[in-house]
Image (cartoon, rainbow, N blue to C red):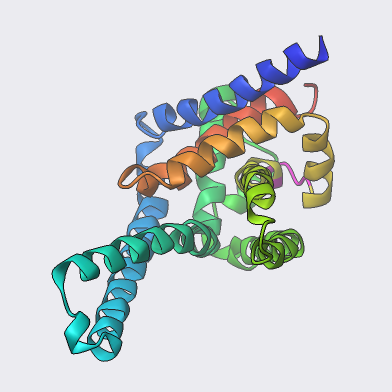
């Protein structure tokens, strides 16, 4: 019975990201998506521009003339592209969320109001975006520190020969857990739920969190679609909070 509930929660978590993509297209919510989406495009574009320019300069400077053949360059660019996907996944997600944190709180508030007809308790403060910037940034710093505590040991173990095969799946699970915390924290914060309490609630519904976070991980790696992941994840995380984790659930 427990395994059946876990499978159900995994599927429900995945479905909430789909709900998020649907909600950000709704009238009354679309305008609150504009700022997070703009941040996404600017950050991602900057990473690609500077990364590509840096790598092109590197090839020109260090690739021997006698190795300057098209096939080798294409191969190196493919390898670089794969590395950029990994770098973009972590750097882009962290940086974009850090910059867009105050606006994501506003988006979460509007999504919750659309779903329930009621504003969260802190709506008076959240709507005053500039008054909450410091609070939002401090929240992102707390999440970043929590992420580093877990991810640094995994990153070190990844370089140990033979362990990558084992650590890889564990890394995926950890990434799913961390991204679930990242995006569900926005509606939770609107209800003045501390990050520690949110972790406690999600531990009781681990499969739900991993299903949602896993869906975010996968879509973050899909070109073009990944530009819309952040607002969709905020909206989906808010729907998940309202239906599954809020008080009374």
Say which quarter of the image contains residue 151: bottom right
Say which quarter of the image contains residue 120: top right
Magenta region includes residue 162: no
Task: Tell me what residue is drawn at x 75 percent, y 59 percent.
Answer: 150
Instruction: Please name whichever residue, 90 or 134, is drawn nearer the observer in this view of the structure.
Output: 90
Task: Tell me what residue is drawn at x 42 percent, y 63 percent.
Answer: 83
Task: Tell me what residue is drawn at x 30 percent, y 46 percent.
Answer: 224
Q: Residue furthest front?
A: 66
Figure quadrant of the N terminus: top right
Above/below status of 57 relative to 15: below
Judge left or right: residue 83 versus residue 210. left
Q: Main secondary structure of the magenta part?
A: loop
> x%, y% of residue 202?
77, 36
Judge left or right: residue 168 versus residue 37. right
> x%, y% of residue 212?
60, 33
Instruction: Please name whichever residue, 29 or 197, is drawn nearer the observer in this view of the structure.
Output: 197
> x%, y% of residue 226?
39, 46
Above/below status of 75 relative to 198: below
Judge left or right: residue 113 versus residue 160. left
Figure quadrant of the C terminus: top right
Say which quarter of the image contains residue 247: top right
> x%, y% of residue 45?
30, 64
Q: Residue furthest left?
A: 70
Instruction: Please name whichever residue, 213 or 195, is drawn nearer the observer in this view of the structure.
Output: 213
Task: Tell me what residue is drawn at x 73 percent, y 63 percent.
Answer: 142
Q: Which residues are magenta?
A: 189-193
Q: Residue furthest top?
A: 1
How many numbered marks appear? Answer: 0
């Amino acid at each position: 019975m427990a395994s059946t509930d876990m499978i159900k929660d995994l599927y429900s978590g995945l479905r909430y990201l789909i709900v998020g993509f649907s909600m950000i297209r709704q009238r009354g919510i679309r305008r609150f998506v504009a700022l997070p989406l703009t941040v996404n495009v600017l950050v991602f574009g900057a990473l690609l521009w500077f990364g590509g320019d840096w790598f092109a300069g590197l090839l020109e400077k260090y690739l021997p003339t006698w190795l300057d053949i098209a096939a080798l360059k294409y191969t190196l660019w493919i390898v670089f592209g794969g590395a950029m996907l990994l770098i973009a996944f972590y750097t882009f997600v962290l940086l974009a969320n850090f910059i867009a944190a105050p606006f994501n709180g506003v988006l979460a508030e509007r999504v919750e109001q659309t779903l329930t007809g009621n504003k969260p308790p802190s709506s008076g403060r959240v709507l005053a975006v500039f008054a909450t910037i410091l609070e939002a940034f401090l929240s992102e710093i707390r999440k970043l520190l929590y992420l580093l505590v877990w991810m640094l040991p995994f990153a070190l173990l990844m370089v140990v020969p033979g362990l990558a095969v084992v650590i890889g799946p564990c890394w995926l699970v950890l990434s799913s857990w961390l991204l679930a915390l990242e995006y569900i924290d926005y509606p939770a914060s609107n209800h003045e739920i501390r990050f520690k309490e949110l972790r406690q609630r999600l531990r009781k519904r681990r499969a739900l969190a991993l299903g949602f976070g896993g869906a975010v991980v996968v879509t973050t790696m899909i070109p073009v679609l990944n530009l819309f992941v952040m607002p969709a994840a905020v909206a989906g995380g808010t729907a998940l909070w309202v239906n599954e984790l809020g008080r009374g659930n």
